[in-house]
Amino acid sequence: MSEEREQTETAPRNPHPYVLFARQQVETIVTERRTLGWQDALAVSGQRALWETSRACFVTLKKAHDELRGCIGTILPAYGNLAEEIAANAIAASLHDPRFPRVQNEELPDIIVSVDVLSTPEEVRDTNQLDPKRWGVIVEQGIARGVLLPDLEGIDTVEHQLAVAAHKAGLQSLSGVTIKRFEVNRYRERS
């Protein structure tokens, strides 16, 4: 991952191409029920290298005061390139996050979009290798899996981070789990 883990966009005219593309996909799926494709990504930025890589990502939608509105992602690449990955996760965060109703057209002006591009997860044998500000975690046991992105408000200790991830997996304890960590490059719209 690059040395810079987070790029918060401050200039509304200059959002990162990932954020701009995710925003366009959210707006397009909500208003037109249409999926964007490779050519749409290239129209956002002609830098093919941005889109050609195969990486996992999360697309997060928030409202005022950092209120979560939708967040869906992949921990391993599910599509052939990052353009497809971002588009699919933007659609899922808008329409299919089971915690929320579908995003409505009137909500679009108030939604803030972020895209987290993940490193390849690596197994952790010692929780001293974790830091909730730097590393996201995956807690697995059998088919149960809980994922938590890094640097989330209110998640300040490794113990709390693992407990939340285990809870998301439906696990009562961390006994017998596999723990993996990953880094993200975070791109956000100006809030």
Image: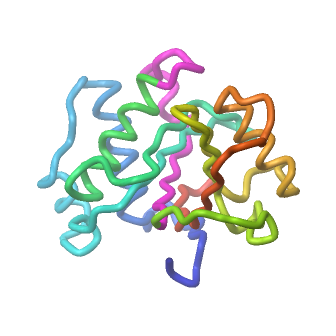
Residue 187 image point, x, y percent: 52, 62
Query: In this figure, which colouring scheme has been used for the structure?
Result: rainbow
User: Does residue 44 sit above or below 155 in this rendering?
Assistant: below
The image quadrant of residue 4 is: bottom right
> Residue, x 56% and y 70% (percent of image)?
7
Question: Farthest front residue?
Answer: 176
Name the residue nearer the viewer: 82 or 175: 175
Residue 171 image point, x, y percent: 72, 30
> For this view, does 110 lie left or right of residue 19?
right
> For this view, does 142 lie left or right of residue 105?
right
Residue 172 image point, x, y percent: 79, 29
> Residue, x 50% and y 60% (percent of image)?
12
Q: Is residue 98 visible?
A: yes
User: Does residue 128 sit above or below 140 in this rendering?
Assistant: below
Name the residue nearer the viewer: 98 or 166: 166
Task: Please check the rendered image and state whether residue 115 is part of the magenta-colored stretch, yes or no.
Answer: yes
> Residue, x 70% and y 35% (percent of image)?
67
Residue 59 image point, x, y percent: 47, 45
Task: Read off the magenta span.
Answer: 97-119
> Residue, x 19% and y 72% (percent of image)?
48
Question: Farthest bottom residue?
Answer: 3
Question: Farthest top residue?
Answer: 101
User: Does residue 171 sit above or below 146 in this rendering?
Assistant: above
Name the residue nearer the viewer: 175 or 79: 175
User: Does residue 32 sit above or below 116 in this rendering?
Assistant: above
> For this view, does 82 lie left or right of residue 183?
left
Task: Please check the rendered image and state whether residue 162 is part of the magenta-colored stretch, yes or no.
Answer: no
